[in-house]
Amino acid sequence: MKIAILSRAPRSYSTQRLRAAAVERGHDPKVLNTLRFAIDLSAEVPDLLYRGRQLSDYDAVIPRIGNSITYYGTAVVRQFEQMDVYTPNTANGISNSRDKLRANQILSRHGVAMPPTAFVRNRADVVAAIERVGGAPVVLKLIEGTQGIGVILAPEMKVAEAIIETLQSARQNVLIQRFIGESRGSDVRALVVGDRVVAAMRRTAKGGEFRSNVHRGGSVERVELDEEYARTAVRAAQIMGLKVAGVDMLESELGPLVMEVNSSPGLEGIETATKLDVAGAIIDYIANQVAFPQIDVRERLSVSTGYGVAELVVHGDADLVGSTIGDSGLRERDITVLTVHRGTQVIPNPSFRERLEAEDRLLCWGRVEEMRSMIPERPKRRPRVKKLPKHPIPLEE
């Protein structure tokens, strides 16, 4: 394979290890500065220029996009995707993971366990938000912070209010998150590659520091994850659209709580702690997947006029409950079931013999009008009981 490693730090440990692992396996890696690309939208087919010249053909690209260049870096990755070059981490996946609020919204929608979190802008809403997540102490996080920068522990309500007010006055967006005391300044990072955890380490904060990041002086040790933690890490990475990710989890009394999903995880700490060839595992995975470049399924399938992608929910009182996909009548209505989501289980490309259960979520492609007729009205919030009017019975004129 010819592999492009997008990195502005060619001498960093992670970049050098990825390059060395690729060379060791007989591939041809090139480290390319992300900012030296130019996106050509005038050609008949999607194209890229590098240092003013047309980019040669590549089989795969490994994005190592720094936080400071997220917008431009993801634009370059997206152009590689348009050129059908394989990337383990899509532009959308990188963008979603880089914005802490967006990442929390996506993970929450899929029922991934996380520390209780709130986001507010109005000063009048701060106290109520802190109380909703469990009260002080709370952890305050800048939405676009990285490596522990912009993460503050506020021990008291007044302190939290003052910090939030100061950050917001500097036009910084802040997440309010419950402090998980039982984690005792440590967390677990699982390095996910594809559909498995290839290595994991526990990071422990130094001294009185509560942030366990290696960049903050924290220590690391190898850890063997149990099934629940490994499953949570893989699911979080997949939901974010990342095939290579560092998933940070707190060890709470209720089990793993996902803190962050990192699209450009550093390799030095985890390879040092585990003595495992994580870079090699990444290259091996890419070699096995390079023939299957990432595509936007919804975008591609929606090109046909009158057809689109939709998610249909099998409600408990629906006629579909108990029937097979073959007997459901969906095919006759020009609707194809691509995937069945059943709780946390995913059944890809289900057979006609798959029997549908209540609350199954069917990812379908087909005629839009037919699917629209099967989507019930959105549930409305229960109306609040209003106060009795001053004159319950209108006065006679």
Image (cartoon, helix red, strand yellow):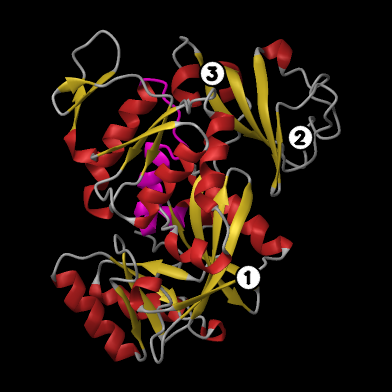
**Magenta segment, prevailing SS (helix, strand or loop):** helix
Q: Give the distance between the C-alpha atoms of the residues marked 1 and 2, in whole angstroms.
A: 46 Å
Q: Which residues are magenta?
A: 83-105
Callout 2: SS: loop
Q: Residue at x 37, y 59 (%)?
A: 100
Q: What residue would you read off at disc 1?
A: 223
19 horizontally vs 364: left or right: left
Q: Which residue is mark 2?
A: 318
Asked whether the beta carbons under mark 2 and mark 3 sit within 8 Å of each other, the answer is: no
Residue contact between numbered discs 1 and 3, judged by CB atoms under 8 Å: no
Residue kind at label 1, given as amino acid type = Val
Q: Name which of mark 1 and mark 2 comes first in the sequence.
A: 1
Q: Residue at x 84, y 26 (%)?
A: 324
Tell me which label, 1 or 3, sits earlier in the chain.
1
Callout 3 amino acid? Val
366 or 181: nearer the viewer = 181
Q: In the image shown, does 91 or 307 lie closer to the viewer? A: 91
Instruction: Determine the CA span between mark 2 and mark 3.
Output: 20 Å
Q: Could you tell me residue 206's position as x and y percent?
A: 41, 86
Q: Name the image quarter holding residue 91.
A: top left
Q: What is the crowding at mark 2: few (fewer than 14 residues within 10 Å), some, or many (at least 20)?
A: few
Q: Is residue 234 left or right of residue 32?
A: right
Residue found at x 17% / y 21%: 53
Which numbered tag is attached to residue 368?
A: 3
Q: In front of the other: label 1 or label 3?
A: 1
Pick the residue in front: 44 or 56: 56
Residue 167 in the image, given as x and y percentages of width and height: 20, 73
In the image, is residue 334 part of the stretch drawn in magenta?
A: no
The quarter of the picture where residue 36 lies is: top left
- Asked if 138 appears above or below 101 in the picture, the reply is below
Q: Please provide percent x and percent y for residue 186.
A: 51, 79
